[in-house]
Image (spheres, helix red, strand yellow):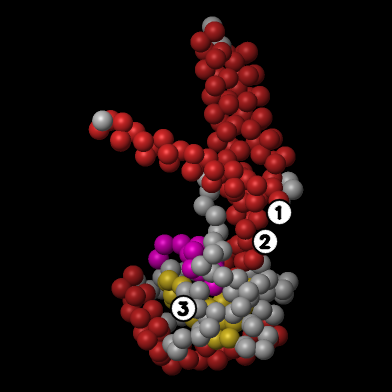
Amino acid sequence: MARTSSAAPTASAEPGRLRQMWDVFKMTRKYDKQALPLMIGGFLLPVVVGVVLALVLSTGIISTVLWIVAGVLGGVLLATVILGRRAEGAAYSQISGQPGAVGAVLRSSLKRGWRGSEMPVAVNSKTRDAVYRAVGRGGVVLISEGPKSRTGRMLEEERRKINRTVPNVAVTTINVGPDDDAVPLRKVASTLTKIKPTLTKTEVQAVDNRLSSLQAPLPIPKGVDPNRVRAPRQPR
C-alpha cells in the first residue's frame, strides 16, 4: 500500500507538466508564427546528425540505435529550449507598451540580488506614465514607463528624493517606452545585472528598507495585472 500511495503523486504530476508545456506551446504559436518552424528545425537537426554519425561511425546494430536515440533526445532538448525562449518573447510582446508592464517584470523576473516591486514610486494620473524603483548591488535604479518627453521630469524628481535620502548611493535611470534608445521590456532584468556593483548585500537591504519606509503607497497603473502576468518559465 505504501508503494502504491507514493507512486500516485508522481503519476498525477506528469500530466500536469505535459499540460503546462502544451499550454505554453499554444500561447507561443498564437503570438509567434516562427516558433513552430524553429522548433521543428531544432528537433530535426540533431536527429539528422545522429543518423549521419550512426552511418559513419557505428560498428553494429547497438551502436547505430544509440546514435539515433542520442540524436532524438538532443532534438527534443533543443526544441524545448527554443520553445522556452520564444515563449518568453511572446509573453513580453503581449504586455509591452501597456501600463504596469514594468511592474510585472520587476515582480517576477528580477535576478538574484535585486529588489523591486510592481508598485510604482510615481504615477501620472492623466497619461498613466509611471516610474518604478529597483535596488541591488548596482545601487538604485529608476525605471520610467512611457515616452521620455513625459517621464523625464518624474525621473528627475525621484532622483533628487533618493539623493537626499541616501546621498552616497549611485542612482541609474532606465527608460522603457516608445523611444528609439529605450530598453526593451524583455531586457530590463538583464540590464540591471550589467550595472557595476557598488553596494554589499547588507547595504542593499538597508537602502531598500530606508527608501521603502519613506514611500507612500501609490496605485498600480491600470493596464497589466502584475499578479496574473509573469514571464513564463522555460519548460523542463
Given the image, on which type of amino acid does mark 3 rest?
A: Val
32 drawn magenta = no
Report the span colored magenta.
103-113
* Figure check: 169 above or below 64: below
Q: Quadrant of residue 99?
A: bottom right
Pick whichever of labels 3 and 1 is earlier in the sequence: 1
Taking the image as shown, residue 7 lies to the left or right of residue 45, namely: left
Q: Are marks 3 and 2 in contact (CB under 8 Å)?
A: no
**Mark 3 or 2 closer to N-term?**
2
Crowd tier of the residue under label 1, counting other residues whose Cα lies within 10 Å: few below 14, some 14–19, many 20 or above: some
Q: Give the distance between the C-alpha atoms of the residues marked 1 and 2, in whole angstroms.
A: 8 Å
Q: Is residue 175 visible?
A: no
Q: Which mark is residue 93?
A: 2
The residue at the point 66 percent across, 24 percent down is 48
Residue on which disc 3 sits = 140
- Residue drawn 54% across and 69% down? 226
Three-letter amino acid code at the position of disc 2: Ser
Secondary structure, mark 3, is strand
Is 55 placed left or right of 234 in the picture?
A: right
Q: Position of residue 58 (x, y in %)?
A: 56, 11
Q: Residue 45, position in %: x, y?
A: 66, 30
Give residue 31's mark. 1
State left or right for residue 1 relative to residue 126: left
Residue ID at (55%, 79%): 220
